[in-house]
Image (cartoon, rainbow, N blue to C red):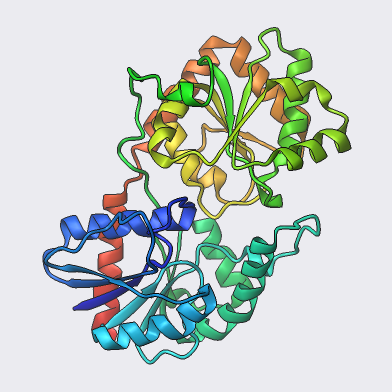
Amino acid sequence: MKIGIEAQRIFRKNKHGMDYVVLQEILQLQQTDRKNEYFVFVKPGPDRCVKDSSRVHVIEVGCPSYPLWEQWALPRAARQARVDLLHCTSNTAPIWCDIPLVLTLHDIIFLEPRDKQNHSLYQNMGWLYRRLVVPRILGKCRRIITVSDFEKDNIVRKLNIPERRMAMIYNGYNDWFRPVDDNESVYRKYMPEKGFLFFLGNTDPKKNTERTLVAYSKYLEQSAVKRPLLMADLEKEYLDGIISRNHIENIRDHIFMPGYIPNSDLPYIYNAAFTFLYTSLRESFGIPLLEAMACGVPVVTSNTSSMPEIGGPDAILVNPENSDEIAKMILRLETDSSFYEAQRQTGLKRAKLFSWRQTAGQLLELYEEVKGEI
């Protein structure tokens, strides 16, 4: 079988969630599948993280914009490669395409009520594009993959997709996320000492950055230790607005904001952290939750959407809209060493249930199933 995989953004330098998912799926399929042939369609970029092999062919497709690339250049390149099916991996797909389609629909957040405080042009344009495209392609997809039972049920209920056309395949995590000794002190590029709090926040309202920072302010007021907070992907101007609106000037001198953190540095940061805060309002899966658990750092996460499903029954689950509850759990981890160690062990055990190899195996089974129906 000749399988096409859309992986438009994996060659860009600063990758994010969906980029890492498809990248790891491709690398695992390249290692394990000796039967099928793959054509990986990418946009040119500096990080050539997938290389050609006997059964994997990387096809660079240039085009000036995401919509034009996906709607015109991608189906054209896929037809030229004569693929038997095309797997589009990032929520959208070509509207006009005569090749059998498989779609990974990570979530349908774009159909849910929006937070009007989101002023990011990039995020708003992505939201509009998905709202225009997704309803037009769902009926054409042979299978729709999503990444948690929560999201599968959500999609079936809200979009009336027949169960037989849906598939749930969990994400995994890279095996370099594990307890490690940081002999080179990589974390010192970001923090002066170990034992800090770590939060991957950004301007997307679903990441719950504002309430998490209010919780951090309350933690500082009550803690005898007053651990600093490392935050990635956040600009100073955005932080200033949060501090001003909420009158939490006490956090300013305790926050470190290095900007984008490469994935290769994250294992050392997790290992050096005291606690990882994953207090999002809404996630379809939550790979950072897995990564942190696999590194043996306790995680404070949310009791909403997929996070209880991924974190498991013994995870620390809080109401992400309650800043007092978030602060309380950080303080408990700081003052109760038995609870802290129990959470470390819980996370390490839970993470072992997930892997990219397992993800790729289920994906391959789905491809074979679809091929049998064509």
Question: Is 165 situated above or below 365?
Answer: below
Q: Position of residue 230 (x, y in %)?
A: 59, 28
The residue positioned 71% from the left and 35% from the top of the image is 212
The residue positioned 54% from the left and 10% from the top of the image is 337
Question: Is 193 situated above or below 187?
Answer: above
* Total count of labels: 0
Question: Is 100 situated above or below 298?
Answer: below
Task: Decide if residue 258 is on the left or right side of residue 367.
Answer: right
What is the quadrant of the N terminus in the image?
bottom left
Q: Position of residue 91 (x, y in %)?
A: 51, 69
Is residue 63 or residue 140 the one in the foreground?
Answer: 63
Q: Position of residue 238 (x, y in %)?
A: 75, 42
Task: Decide if residue 308 is on the left or right side of residue 346.
Answer: right
What is the quadrant of the C terminus in the image?
bottom left
The residue positioned 79% from the left and 36% from the top of the image is 240
Q: Position of residue 65 (x, y in %)?
A: 52, 74
Q: Quadrant of residue 156?
A: bottom right
The residue positioned 60% from the left and 73% from the top of the image is 130
Is residue 57 or residue 373 the one in the foreground?
Answer: 57
Q: Quadrant of residue 115?
A: bottom right
Question: Is 254 situated above or below 99?
Answer: above
Q: Is residue 346 visible?
A: no
Q: Is residue 117 visible?
A: yes
Is residue 202 or residue 367 the one in the foreground?
Answer: 202
